[in-house]
Amino acid sequence: MSDIHKQLGTKLKLFFFDEMSPGSCFFLPDGAKIYNNLVDFLRNCYRSLGYKEVITPNLYNKNLWEISGHWDKYKENMFLIRKLADKEEEENEYSLKPMNCPGHCVMFKHLSVSYRELPIRWADFGVLHRNEFSGALTGLTRVRRFQQDDAHIFCTFEQVEKEIEDYLLFLKKVYEHFDFKFEVELSTRPEKYIGDLENWDKAEQILEKKIKMIPKWKINKGDGAFYGPKIDVKIRDSLKREHQCGTIQLDFNLPERFDLKYIPNEGEPKRPVLIHRAIFGSVERFMAILLEHTSGKLPFWLSPRQICIVPVSNKYLPYCNKIKNIFNKYEVNVDDTLETLNKKIRNAEKMKFNYVFVLGEEEENNNTINIRIRNNRLGLKNIEETLEICNQDYNQKNLFKI
């Protein structure tokens, strides 16, 4: 990935990096708007798809990671804390979480789950920290502090097929919404694996069957995780570059390690299957890809700079402020500088405003708005027509009807 998104971050005053916190991004107000709009976009989807959002701790005792297996396999990528305040439990070690799944297993085990409650779909936008090598840090695409559109699904083995299908349909809708083409890869059982071979075979058959819903797919034999097969999703941007984003993984390992069980209709408690899934991957990485994909010209609903109101001269500022108040549900700026009209319009275009409203005598006398949409003149519209145009664009943030 190039540094274009970092250049856009500086030019558009969205974010920056500083050695005071290497590998962690400082999001300025307009950058935070984009970030939060992406998260809210998914939250709106989750309400329609049966996901429930949870909040989990950032700090865990090493015992959690020993149970999950990460202490042996992932410790070097974790930020360790060897001592808490007031000498509390000095002998124990703690770490900031690099992923959410073990914490979700703790939550599942805390409950007495009936088969009637499955599948359970938990989404978590919690902050994660991974101790990436300094040489691997590349803008927003590889950071030490980030958030994922992370979700874990606890279900019966019989429910796995439907959950995979629903995920792929959801993923397809999201990527098409952002105008991305994508393909999927199924990674199958590696030489060193854990769990029951029969379950592995069934899971791979389900995943292979379901990826054929996607036009472009392939199989990577032996490249699965040790705990289960997975599907990786790669998107292509406007420059035909490939980016790893989404993933879905079947996990027999963590339910076993944490001794997770649910109460079936009859008989002894049974082990659930754990599905790990993400669509954006990390919010930071997806934001970087999207900025480069669009050259900073974000959709209206996502943009931190939606409308710039430009007066022909400052004597029309009262009318400009009237229009601003009418459109106050959007991100609106009135350019009251002393620059020329053409310079104000150019500045608005450079800062990637979606709409420029040019207001002067004619507009004030007729209660109209002269609209420009990113270098194109839309012409004169009355206020009601303009509100309708903006509302239609803004409502594109809803992928599903709520």
Image: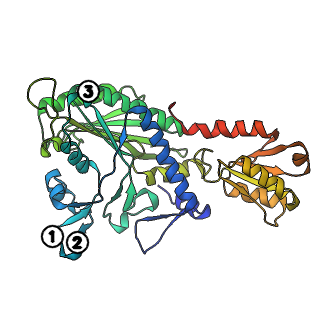
First along the sequence among labels 2 and 3: 2
Q: Is residue 171 above or below residue 106?
A: above
Do labels 2 and 3 touch, CB within 8 Å?
A: no
In the drawing, what numbered circle is on residue 89? 1
| Residue 327 screen position, x and y as percent | 71, 47
Between the C-alphas of marks 2 and 3, the distance is 42 Å
Q: Which residue is mark 3?
A: 159
How many other residues sit within 10 Å of disc 3, few (<14), some (14-19) or many (≥20)? Answer: some
Who's the residue at 82% across and 58% down the image? 317
Between the C-alphas of marks 1 and 2, the distance is 7 Å
The quadrant in which residue 92 appears is bottom left
How many other residues sit within 10 Å of disc 2, few (<14), some (14-19) or many (≥20)? Answer: few
Q: Which residue is mark 2?
A: 84
Asked whether residue 100 appears in the rendered view, the answer is yes
The quadrant in which residue 182 appears is top left
Q: Is residue 48 above or below residue 321?
A: above
Q: Is residue 289 above or below residue 384?
A: below
